Amino acid sequence: MKTAGSILLCFVVTGALSAAESAALSDRLKAEVRANLPAYTPPPAKPADTPTAAGAADPDVLVLPKLIVKEKRIPTHDPDVWRSERDIQQRAMQAYQDSMTPLEWALNSWFVPLFSAPASVRARAAYRENKLTEELSTMAYLAEIGQRDDAQISAAVKTAVGEMQKADDWQSRPAGGK
């Protein structure tokens, strides 16, 4: 115990001496560094926005500085943007289960990992497919309404709907399929 205490005492004394020496050394270094640097002059204060002639006449009017606020654009009308992933998955599972009879659900809820996807994945795919079908039908409906007013715009919308359907077919078809 005596040796451990004496070793500890040596470390404490050495540390205290080196701290005092480094403090003196740092003061000397600070003085040298400050001597080589130019004097600090703070930048002039920016004047506040000057009030207009009409504002200066009325002392009760408070003139505020001009600010520009750029807000992020609110996402589209898609309600899934505001929902959590868990809520979307629950809705997809409920819609998938509601689209089947109890016997079909009992048979489809089982899966073999190597040969089929779980019901949650199939439900999410069906949910996505239903959303896309609704969007495409809405676009087609708008194209029909637009045809009454402007046939050229309606043709452009119909072309865009066709391209959307092709893109979805290309993205959802299996690899190597035609």
Image (cartoon, rainbow, N blue to C red):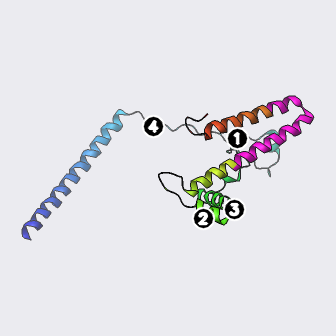
Residue linked to disc 3: 98
Q: Is residue 104 magenta?
A: no
Q: Earlier in the sequence, mark 3 or mark 2?
A: 3
- Please name the amino acid that badge 4 sits on: Tyr
Q: Is residue 139 visible?
A: yes
Q: Earlier in the sequence, mark 1 or mark 4?
A: 4
Q: Give the mark toward the camera: 4 or 3.
A: 3
Residue linked to disc 4: 40
Q: Give the mark toward the camera: 3 or 2.
A: 2
- Please name the amino acid that badge 2 sits on: Ala
Query: Which corner quadrant of the image does residue 164 belong to?
Result: top right
Residue 24 image point, x, y percent:
24, 48
- Please name the amino acid that badge 1 sits on: Asp
Q: Give the mark toward the camera: 3 or 1.
A: 3
User: Which circle marks residue 49 in the picture?
Assistant: 1
Q: Earlier in the sequence, mark 4 or mark 2?
A: 4
In this rendering, the count of numbered labels is: 4
How many residues crowd mark 2 within 10 Å: few (<14), some (14–19), many (20+)? few
Q: Which residues are magenta?
A: 130-157
Q: Is residue 74 visible?
A: no
Which one is in front, 51 or 79? 79
Query: Which corner quadrant of the image does residue 161 belong to?
Result: top right
